[in-house]
Image: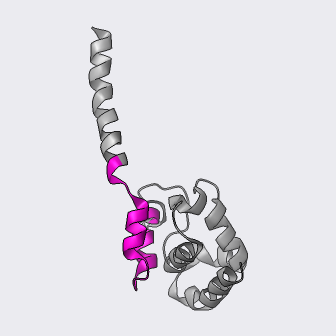
Amino acid sequence: MYVFKAIQRVIPVFLSMTVYANSHHPQDFLNQIAGSNNEGEQIVKHFCISCHASKPLIPIGAPRKQNIDDWEARVRQGADRLFQRASEGFNAMPPRGGCFECSDKQLVLAILEMLPEKIKKDMKNELLELKKNK
């Protein structure tokens, strides 16, 4: 009896995971948005915003999108360090922010989308040059 009830509870969870796995095709998504004018924005919305929104769904202390107070100290560490942490992961953030299929260029575009406008102008060339030389 208990086994039957346990199975009844497990089956919906298993089925929902299977449906999600079959419907989650990040490479297809990235191919569709490649080269678009808002590629970085779309990547952030798809992979990053749960933790980096102004009111995040997952409040883990991640820098909030375009919040200058959250980003100033991080940007002072330089483009190399900013990209390294995004690429390798940092604290609770997984490598590449969970976008394991993102190219380095797409990761840079997502980083730039997260930065406040005031900082973005200064960091854009530095981040793009960084990836060009690697």
Residue 118 appears left or right of 22: right
The stretch in magenta equals 22-48
76 relative to 115 in the view: left or right: right
Please tell me which residue is depicted at 64% across the width and 59% down the height of the picture: 90
Check the image and report above or below for 105 versus 57: below
Q: Which color scheme did the rendering employ for the protein? A: one colour
Q: Most extreme residue toward the top, as rendered?
A: 1
Q: Is residue 64 magenta?
A: no
Kindly indicate the quadrant of the structure image that contains residue 6: top left
The quadrant in which the N terminus is found is: top left
Q: From what the image shows, is residue 77 above or below residue 52?
A: below
Residue at 31% over, 10% down? 2
73 or 17, nearer to the observer? 17
Q: Name which residue lies at 56% across and 86% down.
A: 120
Closer-to-camera residue (98/36): 36
Quarter holding the C terminus is: bottom right
Q: Nearer the viewer, residue 54 or 40?
A: 40
Locate residue 124, reporting x and y percent: 59, 87
Residue at left 42%, top 69%? 30
Location of residue 23 with respect to 114 vertically, above or below: above
35 drawn magenta: yes
Magenta-colored segment: predominant secondary structure: helix
Is residue 16 found left or right of 132 in the rendered image?
left
Residue 119 in picture, x, y percent from top left? 58, 86
Q: x%, y% of residue 105? A: 56, 77
The tally of labels here is 0
Above-or-below relation of 43 to 58: below
Instruction: From the viewer's side, name the closer residue of 108 and 21.
Output: 21
